[in-house]
Image: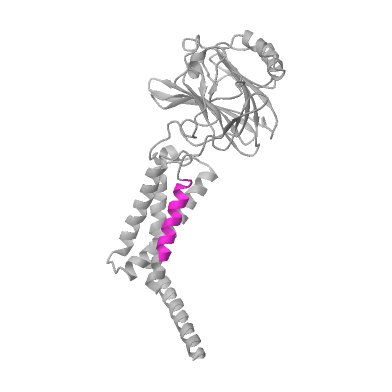
């Protein structure tokens, strides 16, 4: 009876770990919906993107550029990638815009002599829940100015955004490499091959928010997305039909990494440390119960080693399968932490004091059962 119970416990632990690691087992439906008054709403798992790198006149050979986006976040206590420009050939996200809690976060990457240089820019307390914000990023190629609702909020002389950074594949609502979805509404997006002045930014803010779409077109953007189609899975570029955005039926991450290396996964944050601890603790039961089963039922001479190998194989299987699931991340860090958790569980069972305690508990249960049986007689 005890052998059967131990086997069932091992099976339950294994099923629980596989479920936790692979749920929901499939790519969810793309949660992009059209608004009745123009615009798109992005749910928890949502993305739209261009089918290839943007080919916009005047961007590739230019320096100055500007981006305008009119949006309304669903939350001000979470965040995600609002949009990004990605070059698939070298897996570089040249420019991306995030919501970080209620902050606006810009990140740029440039390549010089095969070396990548990263630049970051934070603007605090930009977003409020269910509040519409009109964000403008204007750059002369050497530095950038950021405006919110027509007002200047930050100038960064060192944030070197250039028009070449806006020629990659455009992804809206998610990051091209990881599951980092943004939730909210987007009502307009425009890209310019020139630096916008403060007066133009204020004028455009008034035009966007009063639906003066003809005036926006006359200001000469190289890409203009009004999200006013009303139906269908295509978002048309009002300036160039060759740079349309598509709404896929299923949610996916464009180029998620396969078994990402630990040094690429590492982040100096509490959330990263919490995930490491969860991954260690989640495999401790596997190590404990499988070591008990292999040593007491199967009578293996090296039950502890076999259990640790089993934990590593299970973790590797999960990480390989996770590369096909857009809501999960495939990385090598989890393999190490899961195997460590398995080792801790196996060593706990192998500890003499723990085994003595278990024997005492089993003996007490047996004596109690005998006492109940005698009483019934």
The percent coordinates of residue 264 (x first, y second) are 42, 37
Residue furthest toward the bottom? Answer: 377
Quadrant of the rendered image containing residue 330: top left
Q: Is residue 213 left or right of residue 47?
A: right
Quadrant of the rendered image containing residue 195: top right
The percent coordinates of residue 285 (x first, y second) are 44, 61
Would you say residue 196 sits in the magenta stretch?
A: no
Q: Examine the residues drawn in magenta and state their main secondary structure.
A: helix
Which residue is more in the foreground, 38 or 360? 38
Position of 213 relative to 39 (above/below):
above
Which residue is more in the foreground, 319 or 372? 372
Which residue is painted at 33% across and 62% down in the image? 304
Quadrant of the rendered image containing residue 347: bottom left
Residue furthest toward the front? Answer: 231
Position of 270 relative to 75 (above/below):
below
Q: How is the image coloured?
A: one colour
Residue furthest toward the left? Answer: 301
Which residue is painted at 58% across and 25% down in the image? 231
The tally of labels here is: 0
The percent coordinates of residue 34 (x first, y second) are 61, 28
Span highlighted in magenta in the image = 8-24
| Residue 7 seen in the figure | yes
Q: Is residue 177 left or right of residue 215?
A: left
| Residue 108 seen in the figure | no
Which residue is painted at 55% across and 18% down in the image? 236
* Quarter in which the N terminus is drawn: bottom left
The percent coordinates of residue 191 (x first, y second) are 57, 16
């Amino acid at each position: 009876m005890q052998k059967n119970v131990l086997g069932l416990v091992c099976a339950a632990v294994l099923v629980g770990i596989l479920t936790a690691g692979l749920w929901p087992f499939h790519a969810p439906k793309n949660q992009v919906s059209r608004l009745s008054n123009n615009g798109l709403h992005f749910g928890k798992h949502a993305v739209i993107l261009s089918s290839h790198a943007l080919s916009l006149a005047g961007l590739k050979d230019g320096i100055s550029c500007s981006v305008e986006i009119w949006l309304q976040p669903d939350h001000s206590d979470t965040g995600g990638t609002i949009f990004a420009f990605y070059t698939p050939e070298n897996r570089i996200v040249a420019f991306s815009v995030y919501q970080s809690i209620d902050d606006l976060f810009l990140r740029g990457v440039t390549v010089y002599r095969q070396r990548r240089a990263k630049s970051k820019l934070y603007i605090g307390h930009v977003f409020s829940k269910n509040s519409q914000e009109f964000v403008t990023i204007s750059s002369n190629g050497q530095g950038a100015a950021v405006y919110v609702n027509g007002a200047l909020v930050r100038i960064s002389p060192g944030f070197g955004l250039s028009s070449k950074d806006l020629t990659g594949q455009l992804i809206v609502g998610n990051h091209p490499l990881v599951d980092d979805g943004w939730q909210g509404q987007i009502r307009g997006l425009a890209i310019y091959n020139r630096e916008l002045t403060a007066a133009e930014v204020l004028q455009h803010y008034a035009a966007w928010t009063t639906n003066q779409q003809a005036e926006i077109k006359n200001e000469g953007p190289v890409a203009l997305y009004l999200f006013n189609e009303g139906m269908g899975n295509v978002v048309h570029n009002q300036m160039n039909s060759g740079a349309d955005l598509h709404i896929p039926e299923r949610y996916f991450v464009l180029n998620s990494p396969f078994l990402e290396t630990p040094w690429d996964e590492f982040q100096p944050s509490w959330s990263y440390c919490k995930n490491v601890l969860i991954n260690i603790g989640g495999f401790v039961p596997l190590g404990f119960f499988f070591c008990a089963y292999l040593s007491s039922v199967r009578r293996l001479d090296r039950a502890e080693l076999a259990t640790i190998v089993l934990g590593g194989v299970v973790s590797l299987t999960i990480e390989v399968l996770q590369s096909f699931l857009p809501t999960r991340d495939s990385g090598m860090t989890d393999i190490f932490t899961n195997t460590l958790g398995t080792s801790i569980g196996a060593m706990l069972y192998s500890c003499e004091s723990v085994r003595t305690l278990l024997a005492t508990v089993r003996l007490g249960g047996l004596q109690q059962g005998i006492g109940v049986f005698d009483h019934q007689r």
